[in-house]
Image (tube, rainbow, N blue to C red):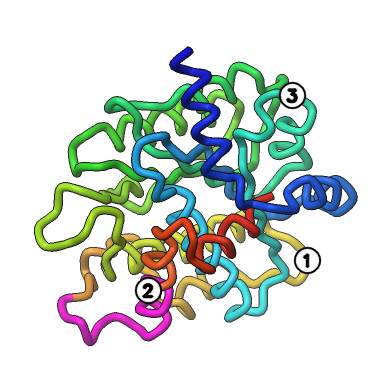
């Protein structure tokens, strides 16, 4: 009964995501994106959709960086849970040799939710050798299991051949509660800055598999000014954050409200 209630709660949370069936049909008739973000959420706890909002932020920044660089990469944002009952459509998310797969989730009971384990148990036999992969995770506290979720997913991705990467020494885990003077569920400017660092690294990882007309990854890294030792240029004042980072943070924080147009936009982007 508990698992059924969790799933019913989840379906209610996503009920405003109209048009999903049409999007699934469209996805089946068009080439799958080069960079795929697969989210296994939300949790039944807060109704804020923290990990979905974070994934949307990362997707938005990846798209902005690819456009800035004039790269031909396409980006898709997928609801993995919707496919858990259909191994064929689930397997399609890992098919045709994606350049990058990013998987996101929230922390349940200090660890992985059941959707994560179910995905890797249901997933048909796959080999994604040559695909770069990583994770983003949200957790209520700084030490409440988010890193366990990230490592759990990454270990399973390694098991099907992915080359796993992280943001240098940092696992991409966003703390959404247990902070001084910050309302629960709000992302900080630093959070969104880290999303952008992760987006830049994702683009660079996508370039590791060379292709006709694609620029040298080292040149792109220099153009971006990206450094894997991100802490060497960590923003120290409000003035260090760009207007794009500020706008995205405001958008993501407004989307905490289930009735907001920002929430509707995020849900409509999920395929």
The residue that disc 3 covers is: 87
The residue that disc 1 covers is: 212
The residue that disc 2 covers is: 250
Sequence-wise, the earlier of marks 3 and 1 is 3
Q: Nearer the viewer, residue 188 or 194?
A: 188
Sequence-wise, the earlier of marks 2 and 1 is 1
Confirm or deny contact between disc 3 and disc 1 (CB under 8 A). no
Tag in front: 3 or 1:
3
Measured in 3D between alpha carbons, the distance from the residue under mark 2 to the one under mark 3, in whole angstroms, is 37 Å
At which x and y percent is residue 262? 51, 67
Q: Residue at x 82, y 50 (%)?
A: 22
Q: Is residue 257 left or right of residue 262?
A: left
At which x and y percent is residue 141? 20, 42
Q: Residue at x 22, y 34 (%)?
A: 144
In the picture shown, does residue 48 fall above or below 195?
A: above
Q: Residue at x 21, y 68 (%)?
A: 232
Q: Main secondary structure of the magenta part?
A: helix
**Can residue 132 be seen by looking at this rendering?**
no
Q: Residue at x 75, y 25 (%)?
A: 86
Tag in front: 2 or 3:
2
At which x and y percent is residue 129? 65, 35
Part of the protein shown in magenta: 236-249
* Mark 3, secondary structure of its residue: helix
* Mark 1, secondary structure of its residue: loop
Measured in 3D between alpha carbons, the distance from the residue under mark 2 to the one under mark 1, in whole angstroms, is 38 Å
Sequence-wise, the earlier of marks 2 and 3 is 3
Tag in front: 2 or 1:
2
């Amino acid at each position: 009964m508990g698992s059924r209630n969790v799933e019913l709660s989840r379906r209610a949370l996503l009920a405003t995501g109209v048009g999903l069936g049409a999007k699934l049909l469209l996805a089946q008739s068009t080439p799958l994106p080069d960079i795929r973000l697969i989210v296994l959420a939300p949790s039944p706890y807060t109704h804020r959709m923290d990990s979905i909002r974070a994934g949307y932020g990362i997707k938005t920044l990846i798209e902005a960086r690819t456009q800035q660089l004039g790269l031909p990469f396409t980006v898709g944002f997928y609801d993995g849970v919707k496919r858990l009952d259909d191994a064929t459509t689930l397997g399609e998310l890992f098919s045709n040799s994606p350049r990058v797969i990013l998987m996101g989730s929230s922390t349940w009971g200090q660890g992985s939710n059941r959707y994560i384990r179910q995905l890797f148990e249901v997933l048909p036999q796959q080999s994604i050798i040559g695909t770069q992969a990583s994770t983003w995770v949200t957790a209520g506290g700084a030490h409440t299991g988010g890193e366990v979720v990230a490592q759990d997913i990454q270990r399973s991705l390694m098991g099907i051949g992915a080359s796993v990467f992280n943001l240098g020494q940092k696992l991409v885990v966003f703390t959404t509660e247990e902070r001084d003077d910050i309302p629960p569920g709000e992302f900080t400017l630093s959070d969104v800055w880290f999303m952008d660092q992760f987006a830049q690294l994702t683009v660079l990882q996508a370039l590791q598999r060379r292709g006709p007309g694609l620029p040298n990854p080292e040149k792109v890294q220099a153009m971006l000014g990206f450094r894997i030792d991100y802490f060497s240029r960590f923003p120290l004042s409000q003035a260090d954050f760009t207007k794009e980072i500020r706008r995205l943070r405001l958008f993501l924080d407004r989307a905490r409200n289930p009735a907001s147009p920002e929430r509707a936009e995020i849900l409509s982007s999920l395929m």
